[in-house]
Amino acid sequence: MTTTPQHHVIKETSDTLTRLFQDEFKRNGYKRVHIVDGAPKPDAIEGKLPAVSVYLYQIALDPPATENTAVHEVVEVAQEDGTIKEYARRRRLWVRLDYLASAWAQTPEDEQLLCGLLLRTIIDNAEITKEKLKGTTFEESMHGYEFTGLPLILNTRMDEGTLARFWGSLNQPIRPAIQFWTAVPIIPERMEEFQRVRSRQLEYRNVHDPVVKEQGPNPNPFARRLDLGRGKKGGT
């Protein structure tokens, strides 16, 4: 059985969101809605109406998760002979994935209906439970954490200037869109084996023990009297 590389977690997060929205639309009677997991460009949407674009537009460090001052973490790896070896690696890096969801249909009314359902799905799934996750990397990614599901959080609104520049870069007029985000870890692959300290040997000596002999410089510079000129006989 092959294990999926851990760095696939970003792709599997997007796959999970696509499946979540697809299932929710079908459950509510919208069986013909296409989920497009790319930039909301006309050529990506053309011929697929009605459609919902779920676009990963930004990947960045997740500030709350990077406050930990620890640089390394310890990993236990089972060996073929049944023993456990410990390795040190740089601690996992939590990244925030920002998504933009927009609806496309024949009429503005239909687009608003799709946007409403998108919003309700995000609110109802503030945490995407394990059974709804698509892929195999989540268990490995969250090992050592109390992982119950993937958080899904609505974002604050974009300012008008940023919104205009975003849609302008796609040669599209400004249209309603929903921002939301989640966070996943990227785990470094490089590890170094290390040994814990099992025992220590301490040695000491009693400075008051007469057996202990301390030797200084030889000859001892303080063994003779220093003549400062006052000890001469017959001086004037």
Image: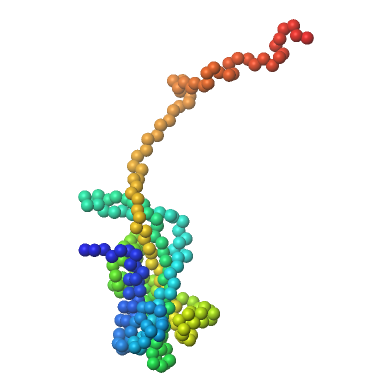
- Residue 154 position by quadrant: bottom left
Q: Is 126 rendered above or below residue 86? A: below
* Residue for point 37% across, 73% down: 127
* Residue for point 55% across, 18% down: 220
- Decide if residue 117 is in sight here: no
Query: Residue 48's x, y, as percent?
Result: 34, 87
Q: Which residue lies furthest to the right in this view?
A: 236
Q: Is 233 rendered above or below residue 89? A: above
Query: Residue 231's x, y, as percent?
Result: 70, 11
- Residue 19 position by quadrant: bottom left
Q: Which residue lies furthest to the top in this view?
A: 234
Identify the coloring.
rainbow
- Decide if residue 89 is in sight here: yes
Q: Is 214 rendered above or below residue 57? A: above
Q: Nearer the viewer, residue 53 or 20?
A: 53
* Residue for point 43% across, 55% down: 71
Q: Nearer the viewer, residue 222 or 209?
A: 222
Is residue 236 shown left or right of residue 196? right
Q: Nearer the viewer, residue 134 or 188?
A: 188
* Residue for point 27% across, 50% down: 84
Query: Residue 212's x, y, as percent?
Result: 45, 22
Q: Nearer the viewer, residue 96 or 202?
A: 96
Query: Residue 236's x, y, as percent?
Result: 78, 9
